[in-house]
Amino acid sequence: MIDAKGIENAIPHRGDMRLIDEIREYTDKTAVGIKYVRDNEFWCAGHFPAKSIMPGVLIIEALAQTACFMVMKATGNNNGKMLGYFVSIESARFAKMVVPGDTLELHIEETASKMKLHKFVGNAFVNGVRVASASFSAIMDDNPQL
């Protein structure tokens, strides 16, 4: 298992924008990340005040960060300096709400890659029930102008 410190050694996301808390397992083509959804998340007060629901876009971002971790480990770029940029989100589906107290399990599979372009399929689960799925592409830039 990789903890938050290990994740931050690989990907550049920090603070409220690091949306994965653990990596349970990974290979060069698959990964399982974990997000503990807490009641003090930055989005809770506004999405929605009467009933906090994790925004779907953040679930997709958590899937993407899990994919980013996997690619950085597979390519040896695990110094937190490579950046991943969405190219497209081909599909996204949301089946159930994710709320504070849930543990989001993020399953990623890389389906294709060519040079810097990587394609992924991701599924998010809570208690074994799929709550979201997406297919998306990203470019991994190992020479960003920071």
Image: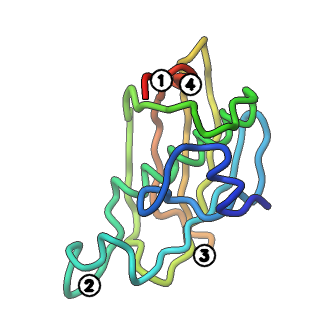
Q: Which residue is mark 3?
A: 127
Q: Is residue 6 above or below residue 70?
A: below
Mark 4 vs 3, N-terminal side? 4
Residue type at numbered disc 3: Asn
**Real-space Cα separation, disc 2 to disc 1, in angstroms:** 39 Å
Q: Residues within 10 Å of mark 1 (few under 14, many from 20)?
A: few
Give the CA distance from mark 3 to mark 1: 38 Å
**Could you tell me if the residues under marks 3 and 1 are in contact, i.e. CB atoms within 8 Å?**
no
Residues packed near mark 4 inside 10 Å, few (<14), some (14 to 19) or many (20 plus):
many
Q: Of label 2 and label 1, which has the lower sequence position?
A: 2
Q: Secondary structure at mark 1?
A: loop
- Mark 3 or mark 1: which comes first in sequence? 3
Residues tagged 2 and 1 counted as in contact (Cβ below 8 A): no
Which one is earlier in the sequence, the residue at label 1 or at label 4? Answer: 4
Q: Report the residue marked by disc 2.
A: 51
Q: Return the x and y of residue 114 as percentages of the image width and height.
A: 60, 13
**Residue on which disc 1 sits:** 144
Horizontal and vertical percent position of residue 23: 70, 57
Type of residue at label 4? His
Farthest bottom residue? Answer: 50
For marks 4 and 2, give the CA distance: 36 Å
Q: To which residue does mark 4 refer?
A: 118
Q: Looking at the image, what colour scheme do you see?
A: rainbow
